[in-house]
Amino acid sequence: MEMRREEIPAGPVITGFAGRGFRVGERVFSGGLLIDPSGVAAWDAPAHPDLLDVAMLGQWLDIDPAPEFLLLGTGARLVQPPRAFVRALEATGIGVEAMDSRAAARAWGVLRQEERQIVGALMPL
């Protein structure tokens, strides 16, 4: 039997859920979450994905190197984000991958394990 050490991706890892929020390491974020390869912050997410606006993400998209795409968690279920929101991000060269927030939290770890340069915005569950 061969034993290999599991490689841990650089940066924060979503390790679980807490109520409607997320656990990152030992920290609990009770609501929305913004995450990139170098950090994590609480996010005052809109009440519904229809209300998303690029300005709500602030400087979170301004990482270097630029993110390939935004991993968007739309809450307890998948809701397609507004077309204007997606077009605005695509105009800056950033794609949008939307899924429910639980799936997005799991995908974050997989994509970071692949060393993908992404950012995440996860709405509460």
Image (tube, grey):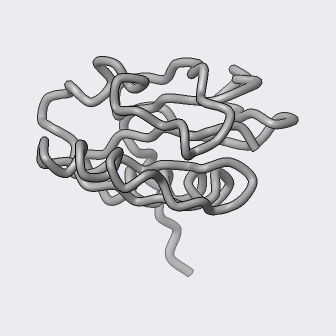
Front residue of this view, candidates 109 and 124 = 124
Q: Is residue 16 visible?
A: yes
Give left or right: position of 49 versus 86. Answer: right
Where the N terminus falls, by quadrant? bottom right
Give left or right: position of 92 versus 78. Answer: left
Count of numbered tags: 0
The residue under the point 63% across, 62% down is 78
The residue under the point 63% across, 30% down is 32
The residue under the point 48% across, 32% down is 12
Give left or right: position of 45 versus 65. Answer: right
Judge whether 97 appears above or below 34 on screen.
below
Residue 48 in the image: x percent, y percent?
65, 41
Residue 6 in the image: x percent, y percent?
49, 56
Judge whether 95 appears above or below 51 on screen.
below
Where the C terminus falls, by quadrant? top right
Front residue of this view, candidates 5 and 124 = 124
Give left or right: position of 119 versus 1. Answer: left
Q: Is residue 115 visible?
A: no
Residue 97 in the image: x percent, y percent?
40, 59
Image quadrant in which you'd find residue 44 = top right
